[in-house]
Image (cartoon, coloured by chain):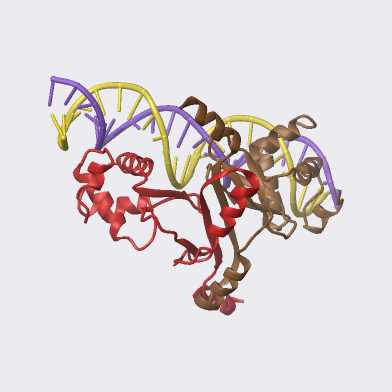
Chain colours: A brown, B red, C purple, D yellow
Amino acid sequence: MDNNTLKSADLKQTKKRILILSVLETAATALTAEEIDELTSKDMKMSISTIYRALNALADKNVIKKALHQDGKTYYEINNHTHRHSLLCTLCNERIPIDACPLESLENYLASETGYVITGHNLEFFGICPKCAAKKAKTK
Amino acid sequence: MDNNTLKSADLKQTKKRILILSVLETAATALTAEEIDELTSKDMKMSISTIYRALNALADKNVIKKALHQDGKTYYEINNHTHRHSLLCTLCNERIPIDACPLESLENYLASETGYVITGHNLEFFGICPKCAAKKAKTK
DNA sequence: CTTGATGCAAAACGTTTGCAGACTC
DNA sequence: GAGTCTGCAAACGTTTTGCATCAAG
């Protein structure tokens, strides 16, 4: 675990912030504030507004990435400066990560076409996972 | 204007619904409920909950598409069964439509790899438009 | 006349904020 | 000790909902 992530982001190194960061570091996918609350509550009790404030501070410093998903919740994940999107089952909410991202070349094209400085993108796939598809076929 | 869009979607043909649909049909981009409220208010006064209910009914019937964007608002647009994404200036909120969508082949790959039935995706680009970039350079 | 649509006000939801007290540096 | 972080409760903005009334089929 990187002990000076907080220090180098000009943020005070509190136990709660360290715990939030370590939860995000070990997570396989992006997490909501509520999920982070659950995961940290075993080790330490903290207010949900503390979690939101810590997450926003970290996102401002680009330590983590923040994105609003279609379920209306904001997801946070460590910013490893690589791309990862996800595929979400609209029935059971299972979420699996996708490594491939075909958008860089499109971004370059868009930049030259529009004059924009492209700073990022948001991409989510929706579908029905095999388990839910099977379940659905049965009940029909 | 298609007079039986509502009828064929099993929805009652009310003046308000017709007006909402016509606003969406003439819009160049996806609209929020609030924007639709403003655009319709010249012709007819209606409650915001009526607008939300009409939009949700239409989205359920796949007459329109509904998507939550990064500004926290839900945008609605006519479902012409083609793809269009957008590029959004994070400073002035200018939004320009993008026709290209390179995701079909990736969707096929994901489907075979994960077993999911892929039903859709959500894609947004962020950047800074030339005007805002110029303004920003001046104030520095 | 039955069913679905509407208005209003209140609630829901995830997130943010003001303020007083507690902690890090 | 200065400046930042935290907890609590209250506020926020968008969207949804319960219920009574109204209009479309």
In the image, residue B21 above or below residue C5:
below
Residue at 25%, 51% (x, y): give it.
B41
Q: What is the x, y in percent for residue B35?
A: 35, 54
Q: What is the x, y in percent for residue A6?
A: 80, 52
Which quadrant of the figure has residue A116?
bottom right
- How many marks overall? 0
Which quadrant: the C terminus of chain A? Answer: top left
Residue at 69%, 40% (x, y): give it.
A50
In the image, residue D23 above or below residue B15:
above
In the image, residue B30 above or below residue B49:
below
Residue at 75%, 45% (x, y): give it.
A24
Whether residue B5 appears in this view of the structure is yes
Most foreground residue, A29 or B91: A29
In the image, residue A46 above or below residue B87:
above
Residue at 72%, 59% (x, y): give it.
A82
Q: What is the x, y in percent for residue A23?
A: 77, 41
Most foreground residue, C3 or B16: C3
Q: What is the x, y in percent for residue A4?
A: 85, 54
Whether residue B46 appears in this view of the structure is no
Say left or right for C24 vs B134.
Answer: right
Most foreground residue, C16 or A99: A99
